[in-house]
Image (spheres, helix red, strand yellow):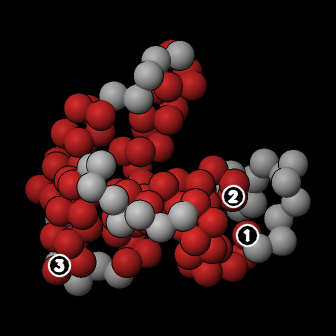
Amino acid sequence: MISEDEAFEKALRMHPQYMNVPEGQEKVDGVNPHLHLYIHAVIERQLTSDEFPVVKEVFIELMKKGLTRHQVIHIIGKPLARQIYYMLKENKPFNSEIYEKDLLEIKDQF
């Protein structure tokens, strides 16, 4: 698995507009850049680990359909963002079953 730093660097290369965003700035063009980069980095790490094989499976399927790596990471990031939202809002643990189910549903949408 790649390190957190390596994953974050990959995310920054995809989003150079967030390179110099101050730590306390919550939004850039309506997006929380810190959370956005974090989600990118988590997906990058999941792609290089065996923790969630479905992430690789969906990634490969969407890439075969002609989407760019960046587009696919954004698409895969949506179920992850949803899980983070519910964890914070409802003070619940990460639900890997729902995460994997949501990821598998993505394949059918494209």
From the viewer's perspective, is residue 80 above or below residue 40?
A: above
Quadrant housing the C terminus: bottom left
Query: CB of mark 1 within 8 Å of CB of mark 2?
Result: yes
Which percent across, then down, holds residue 12? 64, 73
The residue that label 1 is drawn on is 18
**Distance Cα–Cα, label 2 vs label 3:** 28 Å
Q: Which mark is residue 33?
A: 2
- What residue do we see at 23% from left, 42% from top? 100
- What residue do we see at 40% from left, 50% from top? 78
From the viewer's perspective, is residue 44 above or below residue 98?
A: below
Mark sitting earlier along the chain (1/2): 1
Which percent across, then down, holds residue 16? 69, 79
Quadrant housing the N terminus: bottom left
From the viewer's perspective, is residue 100 above or below residue 43?
A: above
Query: Element under label 3?
Result: loop
Residue 9 showing in the rendered view: yes
Query: Element under label 2?
Result: helix
Q: Amino acid at mark 2?
A: Pro
**Residue positioned most to the left:** 108
Density class for disc 1 (Cα within 10 Å; few <14, some 14-19, many ≥20) is some
Q: Amino acid at mark 3?
A: Lys
User: Left or right: where does residue 30 sit relative to residue 102?
Assistant: right
Density class for disc 2 (Cα within 10 Å; few <14, some 14-19, many ≥20) is many
**Distance Cα–Cα, label 3 vs label 1:** 28 Å
Q: Which mark is residue 65?
A: 3
Query: Element under label 1?
Result: helix
